[in-house]
Image (tube, coloured by chain):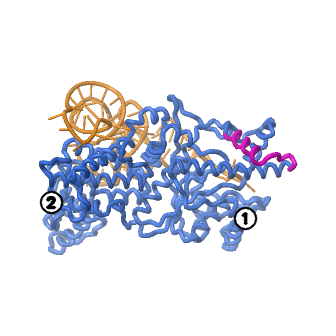
Chain colours: A blue, B orange
Amino acid sequence: MIRELLADRLAHALEAAVAAGDLPPTEAGAIHVERARHEAHGDFASNVAMVLAKSARRRPLDIAQALSSRLETRDDVAEISVAAPGFLNIRVSDAFLRRSLATILTEGREHGRSQVGAGEKVLIEYVSANPTGPLHVGHGRWAVLGSALAATMTWVGYGVSQEFYINDAGNQLQNLGKSLMYRMEGRALPEDASEFYGGAYVAQAAAAARDQLGDLSALDEDARIRRLADFGRDWFLAAQDGTLTRLGTQFDRWVSERTLHEAGAVETMLRSMQASGAVVRRDGALWLTSAEHGDTEDRVVVRADGRPTYLAADMAYHADKFARGHDRLLNIWGADHHGYVARMRAAVACMGRNPDQLEVVLGQLVKLFREGQEVRMSKRTGDMVTLDEVLDEVGRDATRWFLVARSADSTIDFDLDLARQESSDNPVYYVQYAHARICSIMRAAAEAGYLPGSWDGVDLQSFDAPEERALALWLAGFTDEVAGAALAREPHRLTRYATDLAQRYHAFYTQCRVIDAAHPERTVTRLALCAATRQVLAILLESLLGIAAPEAM
RNA sequence: GCGCCUGUAGCUCAGUGGAUAGAGCGCUUGCCUCCGGAGCAAGAGGUCACAGGUUCGAAUCCUGUCAGGCGCGCCA
């Protein structure tokens, strides 16, 4: 946590300057240290002098000067300088960079962990698709985002659980049962078939139902629909599970909406909310008084005919999440559900919880392109490209990378032809190539006897090429980077960091001969850079993003 | 009509109020006697949609306008 270290050091310098009378006492807010963007500005920069200028009633340059002269450099700050209009520019020492290299090597595959999550118990719920069809690429985005976020938050000290909520109650499943029945029995669809599911996957499920269930003609129509709805649920659930496994996303629990109803969880929740006055009867229905908690209007939870709405079950589910001891609920939803956020937060408030304990990450939608044309998806006609097909065409690694590399706020234009054709120029291969390249060097170094058995206590010599230092500096920022990505819930930052790391490695590799019999000590130092880079790349790709870190490709 | 998201290089996108706005792809020009050329170096390419405002400082914050996406059910 190098930026934290420097910020602390600056805070001490500020205290010392105030104590010595160089500066008037002032409201010291959080001191901000950032990575310098230009090499001339050192490695890190702080704007603290400019921030303090107004309250201290002093010129920023004077404040910067005072802090600069009071900063303890010890052996980790090589240089501190002041630049107009009041920047403090800090260059860290090579000794510091060598120490952080040693830390990476000693910690190995556990490097970059921290405790910024403070053990908070977080339940991440994502995908939660209806079991009425195959997953599409949008589900893939939530799956990759959710699993990468889960891994990243776990890495920085959150207690993370991952759940998939199965929407296996209500009309949609009923409609699936009907669709399968019509298909099986070869019946023409009714005039208004808008609620029916169509397409090849319904035909496949219907064929499987015929094989496995046999003749259903002894049952009446309602029973046939129920039977087929159940079959369809299990059929598509298994298919979705299989697709997610291919994609490399694993859930801790799958929670069934139907089970919540059957176990009485919905009823219990409704009774307690009626008792507290959060749920009231009006016009024959039961309403959640969500308008009192920030929603635009109250919402029906039980219809006049007695059937609970989707919201009722979802509220019971969220109450159950809290009851199981999760402090924070993090839901990943498609942007098409954003209108649902206010009512769910209101529901959380009605449970007597702080609505901020519910956090919703809204992901914008994924648009698929094939041959330059957008592929429109329709469940009804079944005209869709499934996530399985994308995995067939593009592969797991590129699919995950492509879906996680962009900010959740940004829609993704997923061009299938481009992803397939240009796969060798895809950034994911660029990063994987760096890893494979290092593995190759390490193999050669091991054969030649340069690789130490353990990195503990190995002496590293000072850097003599700028590319070595640039690489070491970038590696030293990894822990900060992971913490930042987790706290902001933005795993896409990791792909950016990984690309930059690979870029710095390739530049180093081109410029610096690693294995060199004439310079055995320098060889060991450069191998340490290689080993640390490989380690961090492997953590990023495999442990955090769920992407392979190949030893050869 | 109201709400949320987006608008940055030819294309796809990064960019935690800071200094000269970046990456990949595409384009131009160089670089393999030697550890992996799926690589490196250099170059061309920008009214950060537009107009105001806040600030020492705005792509970033606020207001308005324009354009695109998604919502606004006793569907889920």
Whether residue A488 appears in magenta in the rendering, the answer is no
Image location of residue A12, percent across then percent down: 22, 70
Q: Is residue A496 visible?
A: yes
Quadrant of the rendered structure where residue A253 is? bottom right
Camera-side residue: A465 or A445? Answer: A445
The answer to whether the residue labelled 2 contacts the one labelled 1, judged by CB atoms less than 8 Å apart, is no
- Give the number of the disc on residue A78: 2
Q: Residue at x 41, y 56 (%)?
A: A543
Q: Which residues are magenta?
A: A201-219
Residue A298 in view of the camera: no
For label 1, count other residues whose C-alpha is less than 10 Å away and answer few (under 14), some (14-19) or many (20+).
few
Which residue is pictured at 22% across the width and 62% down the height?
Answer: A99
Q: Tell me the amino acid under the disc marked 2.
A: Ala
Q: Which residue is painted at 15% across and 59% down in the image?
A: A80
Say which chain tag 1 marks.
Answer: A
Q: Is residue A459 above or below residue A131?
A: below
The answer to whether residue A215 is magenta is yes
Give the residue type that dot 1 points to.
Glu
Look at the image and tell me in which quarter the C terminus of chain A lies. Answer: top left
Magenta span: helix, strand or loop, mainly? helix
Distance between mark 2 and mark 1 Cα atoms: 66 Å
Q: Residue at label 1?
A: A262
**Is residue A150 rendered to the left or right of residue A526?**
right
Q: Position of residue A251 (x, y in %)?
A: 55, 58
